[in-house]
Amino acid sequence: MSRRARPRMLTVVASAAELFGADLRLLGNLERQSDRDRGSDLFVAKRPVTGSAQSDPIDLETIAGRDNLQHALLLRFMTRVGELAVLGHPDYGSRLSELIGELNDDTRRNLAKLYTLEALQAEPRVAKVISVTATQNAADRTRVDVNVKLQAIDSPTPLNFVFGVYTGGAVGP
């Protein structure tokens, strides 16, 4: 009786950069989103030159891995649905901008949660949304803090982040 050799299973572990890609950086601070002004320019970074007395050249800054996924989600949240229709992406974005000028109350915070869930559903790199909560920010009562916890595709570690939605309207209970 001959013994067959079992085929070996090859396990490939992809890096976070391979899983979530890389892109040009458009937001400087992913934690505070303090550079939310529309029309901001691309970020640049110095590229080191080895073995040369020249000054370091400037290059466009990129963002990769898990930070790129968070960056992409924040850009989706900040873009109005339909804003990129002329570029062939009519469904890209979120409805969060509809909350600007509205009362910051339980109803609007529930809408912020709903609009966030809708936007997350459209992102192909999100495997599962674990939780989304929307609360009034203690320091700025016109800001809704949206806390997102999700499972990204092919990633064992959940991604957690908080972003702000500024209603700018009156403050509710």
Image (spheres, rainbow, N blue to C red):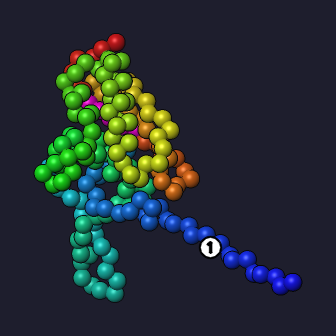
In terms of depth relative to the viewer, which is nearer, 76 or 4? Answer: 4
Does 165 appear above or below 153? above
Residue sitting at 24 percent across and 75 percent down? 57
Q: Main secondary structure of the magenta part?
A: strand
Residue 138 on image: x %, y %: 38, 24
Callout 1 crowding tier (Cα within 10 Å): few <14, some 14–19, many ≥20: few
What amino acid does circle 1 point to?
Answer: Leu
In terms of depth relative to the viewer, which is nearer, 2 or 63? Answer: 2
Number of marks present in the image shown: 1
Residue 48 on image: x %, y %: 32, 76
Q: Which residue is mark 1?
A: 10
Residue 135 sits in quarter: top left
Residue 65 on image: x %, y %: 42, 60
Outermost residue to the right: 1
Confirm whether the magenta stretch covers residue 124.
Answer: no
In terms of depth relative to the viewer, which is nearer, 143 or 7? Answer: 7
Q: Is residue 30 left or right of residue 58?
A: right
Residue sitting at 50 percent across and 47 percent down? 151
Q: Which residues are magenta?
A: 162-166
Outermost residue to the left: 86
Residue 30 in sight: no
Residue 43 on image: x %, y %: 24, 59
- Location of the N terminus (image quadrant): bottom right
